Image: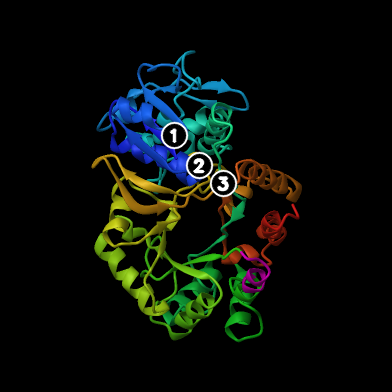
Amino acid sequence: MLLVYTHSISPRLKYVFKHICTRILGIEVAFTAKIEDFIAHDDAKMSYTRQQLGNEFFIKSHDILFEQGITDIEINVHDWENTKCFFYNGDKSAMPFDIFAAAFYLLSRYEEYLPQVRDDYGRFLATESIAFKYGFLHQPVVDIWAYKFKAQIQKQYPDFKFPKKTYGIKPIIDIPSAYNFRLKGVMRTIGGIIKDVFSLKLKTLYNRFMVLFGFKHDPFDNYKYIINKQRQTKFKFLFFFLVGGYSTYDKGTNPNNKEFKSLIKHIADYCHVGLKASYFAIENSAILKKEKLQMESIINASLVASRQSYSKLNFPESYRNLVELEIKEDYTMGYVNQVGFRAGSCTPFLFYDLDYETQTPLKINSYHIMDYALLKHKSLLDKKKVLNEIITEIKQVDGEFVPVFHNYTFSSVSRWNGFKELFNNILDSADGKA
């Protein structure tokens, strides 16, 4: 066990030390503010405070872990070996940066509580993030820093053992609409036909009729293919189905439709199933509760995981609503149009509520790439390059890769050409083939 001496055992300090030491590195960590207990400890130990006590392993602390509330902190990012870091703490510290303070800043999404420019959907923009501005969005810096910390501890305590971690994947299949043409209801189907006619989308109109009369396969119905892929890997896929009402933003299937319910139950026999919360459920806990109960009645089990429509998050309300409804995991943290690590980590972490200064039980599974982010790269070769680069980054820290694909990504629509191959590359990466 690693014992940490500090002048104040704050909730922030305990939160971030447990993420780095326990969640990433797999070791137990304890804290003390008593010097005599620290001296008596005969295993690995370190001091995390303003001044070094003696000759012990020491990291000079930044004030952020001992503060309360949110202030506009000045951030100066520096190059550090193969990565970047901030909160420089001088030459006397065993590490030149306070990685715990920097990790807390990223994991708590401190910057997302501050005033910033948002897009048309009210989402925090990747371009507004410190990681994008200083060129480290593509790296899981928190995990990289943790491994640098591990190396320093092993140097000081050669006999101290760290468990071995292995790289893994958690593929997400997002289902905003189960079918393109089927199960839309009479009014929506007629509306779609009229829209096709007036927009002169004759090919779409032809395909719509062919699907509706059973002569063609619905382009969004790729479930058999995905389930076959699930059978080929030990890593469980996680499907998120939208069961919210039809609106300006959400065009899902009627959750009371028997065939739609049957599809969800069928998928749940092979994969994990979660709730894709509708756009209006993000800010309305009553709607979210209704959708949660709807999904639980379909899968006949307690809902474990959710994901917000449009990957929209409002801090801290979005996550507080999930905590209140006892939803255990969320998969919204990420950027739709940018590849990378929104919270700086490829290890699941708990939501820390900065307003209440408390760690919550909600596990945040940040996703690292969405299929849409790859569309900006024209050739399949370029898409593969981007994908392999992020897989390499995660493998170097034995992390968990969370990609988001959609049911229509696997269709024969031209914009998604090659995406089946990219998905296979992800599966192969976990089996040692890539």
167 or 164: which is nearer to us? 164
The residue sitting at 44% across, 18% down in the picture is: 89
The kind of residue on which mark 1 rests is Ala
Mark 3 vs mark 1, CA separation in Å: 21 Å
The kind of residue on which mark 2 rests is Ser
For marks 2 and 3, give the one nearer the viewer.
3
Report x, y in % for residue 125. 45, 40
Report x, y in % for residue 195. 50, 69
Please tell me how crowded label 3 is: few (under 14), some (14-19), or many (20+) other residues with Cα within 10 Å: few
How many marks are shown on the rendered structure?
Answer: 3
Q: Is residue 305 left or right of residue 401?
A: left
Mark 2 near mark 1, Cβ–Cβ under 8 Å?
yes
Among the 4 quarters of the image, the one containing residue 209 = bottom right
| Secondary element type, mark 1 | helix
Could you tell which of marks 2 and 1 lies nearer the N-terminus?
A: 1
| Secondary element type, mark 2 | loop
Could you tell which of marks 2 and 3 lies nearer the N-terminus?
A: 3
What residue does disc 2 label?
A: 345
What residue does disc 1 label?
A: 103
Mark 3 near mark 1, Cβ–Cβ under 8 Å?
no
| Residue 231 seen | yes
Q: Quadrant of the N terminus?
A: top left
281 or 233: which is nearer to us? 233
The kind of residue on which mark 3 rests is Pro
Q: Is residue 290 left or right of residue 48?
A: left
